[in-house]
Image: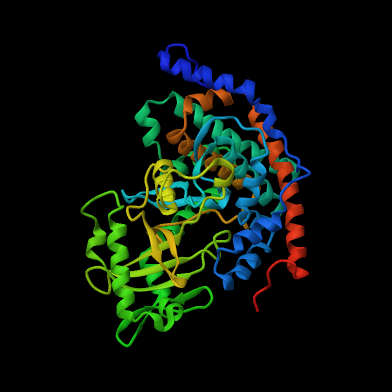
Amino acid sequence: MSTPSPVGYGSGFVARHEAGRAARARSPRSSHRQWHALENRVNPLSLLEEQAESRVPELVPVRYERMRASPFAFYRGGALLMASDLATTDNSGLTVQLCGDAHLSNFGLFGSAERRLVFDINDFDETLPGPFEWDVKRLVTSFEIAGRHRGFSDSERRATLYAAVAGYREQMATSARASVLDAWYDTLDAERVQAWLRDELEAERAKKRQMKGFESIVAKARGRDRMRAFAKLVSTEGGRMRIVADPPLIVPVEDIVGGRLSAADTEARMQEVLAAYQRTLLVDRHPLSEYVYVHMARKVVGVGSVGTRAWILLLTGRDDSDPLFLQAKQAQASVLERFLGPSEFPSHGERVVRGQRMMQASSDIFLGWQPGFAGDGGLERDYYIRQLQDWKGSLDPEVMVPRGAMLYAQVCGSALARAHARSGDRVQIAAYLGDSRVFDEAIADFAEAYADQNEADYRAFVDALDTGLLGASPQ
């Protein structure tokens, strides 16, 4: 897919195209291959300890144990570490709304408001405006680290890295050529991905197996809905529905607040929270108004997010057979802020939601924010709120094979480009990237070098855990 030529376009397009080409002078595409740790590089372990200070103390060891599972798990939890390193690299000056943590496990399928299954980025905790290549570097490096973990050969990993960057570059060129509204509305739904995979695999004998794998992901995603969550997480006690305790991973609210708040006080407070949250939703007459609060519990989520406050809220609609689960997740300052400047929004919950709405073509209708909910400890914290489960599914990196990884990398790169094309100047970025593989090769070289850095940091992390210099393993 070639980069759009300015010939035949209006003067505004031409100026944007020339600005993108001019960016190569201050930041050559080949410069993005460079990675070497500076002598004064911040100690990664000190960054992890700094993050631990604002987290639930008893959950910090859980976070560390999840991160020590593999170099890939460590990378998933190390968004701050990489942001600190990216801040020392060359900067294109081409700004987009960054995901901020665009590793491969933060892409996947979810249900849109139109009840279609779409593929997109699905985590925006760190979103903030910044140079587009930061997201590209984090995504591509994640495939290099996952490929090493899976035992892929050097050539198999390299092909996967090229696929990810080419997917981004070619889609950005397509978005630059598109009309304004077509670029904004462009969405990857499951049927479109499935048709693309079928075309790509047409001449391969492995087609049947690869297609079956994707269809399995789709089927699992459709099965992960609110009724499945209800059956898994809720029991009836004394005629009242309650979220089942599974400490320390799931802890009901009454076990946290103790005797400070009665059940009635908690319910009254949550009704106030939900009323304030409803005012941040996109429509005035929203289905949330027909639901009532029943119960809530703190739930451990993810890898990098472990230790931040995350609540699951059980609500009912028409009756007890019509449940809804919401997740209220604490929003802290983005790991990018110390390097790119503070958010323009008054709360980090709003920052996350505004960023997600900008980057996703179709977002959860329950996506909103609640600034300053007084949670455990009585401290004011920012939260964003969304559905807990709504047709969510993604590739499991523990079972991916080389050909599947390459195809998935291309789809992820394409999805990232669509998101950046909505918030940044897609014409400038496409002109900067160009038609050749100069940028592809540079990012692939960076990914390989940074994967080496990640392995070194991972070994230091494990040694620190084993010697007691960092945290303590849960019993």
Task: Report the side of 444 relative to 22 (left or right).
Answer: right
Residue 54 shows in this picture: yes
The percent coordinates of residue 388 (x first, y second) are 41, 62
The percent coordinates of residue 59 (x first, y second) are 57, 70
The residue sitting at 44% across, 50% down in the picture is 352
18 w.r.t. 222: above or below: above
The residue sitting at 41% across, 68% down in the picture is 312
Between 366 and 264, the one lying in front of the other is 264
Between 66 and 200, the one lying in front of the other is 66
Residue 151 shows in this picture: no
68 w.r.t. 114: above or below: below
The percent coordinates of residue 380 (x first, y second) are 43, 63
The residue sitting at 58% across, 26% down in the picture is 433
Task: Report the side of 470 relative to 272 (left or right).
Answer: right
367 w.r.t. 428: above or below: below
Task: Report the side of 277 relative to 299 (left or right).
Answer: left
The quarter of the rendered structure image containing the C terminus is bottom right
135 w.r.t. 57: above or below: above
Task: Report the side of 82 relative to 56 (left or right).
Answer: right
